Amino acid sequence: MRQATGKNLPRDDRGFIGRVESQVDPRTGVRMVSCAFEVDRYYPRCYDALGIAMPPSIRCSVPKRQAEFLAGRYAGVLALQYLPSVHNQCVQIGIGAQRNPLWPSGVVGSISHVAGMAVCAVAPSVEMDFLGIDVELWMSAKTCREVATIISTGRERDLCQAEGMSEHVALTLIFSAKESLFKALYPAVQDFFGFEVAEASELCLESKILTLRLSECFAQTHTLQREYVCHFTLAEQCVQSVVCGVFPGRASTRFIT
Ligand SMILES: CC(C)(COP(=O)(O)OP(=O)(O)OC[C@H]1O[C@@H](n2cnc3c(N)ncnc32)[C@H](O)[C@@H]1OP(=O)(O)O)[C@@H](O)C(=O)NCCC(=O)NCCS
């Protein structure tokens, strides 16, 4: 298998990967790479073609899962090439005990994929302690009815309504923000935690910031700060959210709130 490096990123994938975009998010300072991909163009040899190793657990999965995993890992490898500590090195992003991506040392990162789009965000761990990204398509009215009380509290829904948000925007945003928080804090917590652990406490539509607050008990148990800033982007079909920052007591040179 050819290994992906910065100088020679292989792309003999018969059009599985479409448009690739890369930017430093001006609000958070994290490097983001997005890759469009077409499940219908996926075939197992795309892994070799893109220089990504197919883990045994993925080998047993259905083609759609193999495709989204590949697109997410490819976005990840491309994003890593922008970091000086990784640039031009052959890297693979492993899989941890609870599906968490395993990043090369000195890197924090996160992956999300939805509807033919994979997104990866990375940053050097000297600048950032935690990083989670999530993209969600807008929920349907039916899904909203089914999940509202599972993923959100009445206070959170009131907060969003007071800002004039429609129900599906509010619920999709709350869901996405909490998924990003989960991904960001998983490396510190090392265990599953549910939606009841965090509550959206402030919303600023102008700056597109939702503040999430952990329950006192959960924060104390895991020695975590209680408040987390979630930067979000509302697009035509989806919401993207990013939760990132430094833990208290550690100064960051580049993190912008
Ligand atoms: C794990 C979870 C967050 C994934 O989110 P999703 O919307 O289903 O899927 P996405 O495409 O956005 O993200 C999938 C990626 O998340 C990453 N991920 C999965 N588990 C993870 C974990 N434990 N820690 C960090 N990242 C994780 C992986 O990179 C995965 O892609 P991959 O398997 O191809 O590598 C979700 O399935 C889940 O279990 N949520 C419940 C936990 C939760 O959100 N609690 C709320 C706390 S306030």
Image (cartoon, rainbow, N blue to C red):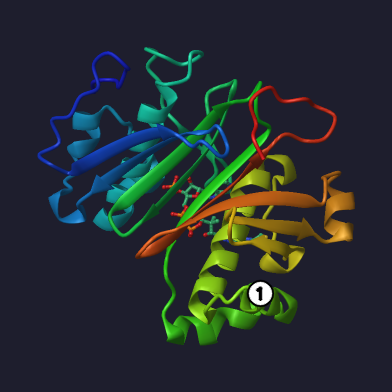
Q: Is mark 1 within 8 Å of ligand 1?
A: no
Q: How many marks?
A: 1
Q: In the rendering, at what x and y percent does residue 240 appear?
A: 47, 54
Q: Nearer the viewer, residue 242 or 159?
A: 159
Q: Residue furthest left?
A: 14
Q: Which residue is mark 1?
A: 152
Q: Is residue 64 above or below residue 83?
A: below
> In this image, 177 relative to 118: left or right?
right
Q: Nearer the viewer, residue 76 or 159?
A: 159
Q: In the rendering, at what x and y percent does residue 109 appear?
A: 53, 35
Number of residues whose C-alpha sits closer than 10 Å to that of mark 1, classed few (under 14), some (14–19) or many (20 or more): many
Answer with the quarter of the image where residue 115 lies.
Answer: bottom left
**Amino acid type of the residue that numbered disc 1 sits on in the rendered structure:** Ser
Answer with the quarter of the image where residue 136 lies.
Answer: bottom left
> In this image, 84 relative to 180: left or right?
left
Q: In the rendering, at what x and y percent does residue 23 appear?
A: 40, 33
What residue is shown at x 39% (from left), y 21% (from top)? 81
Q: Is residue 47 above or below residue 126?
A: below
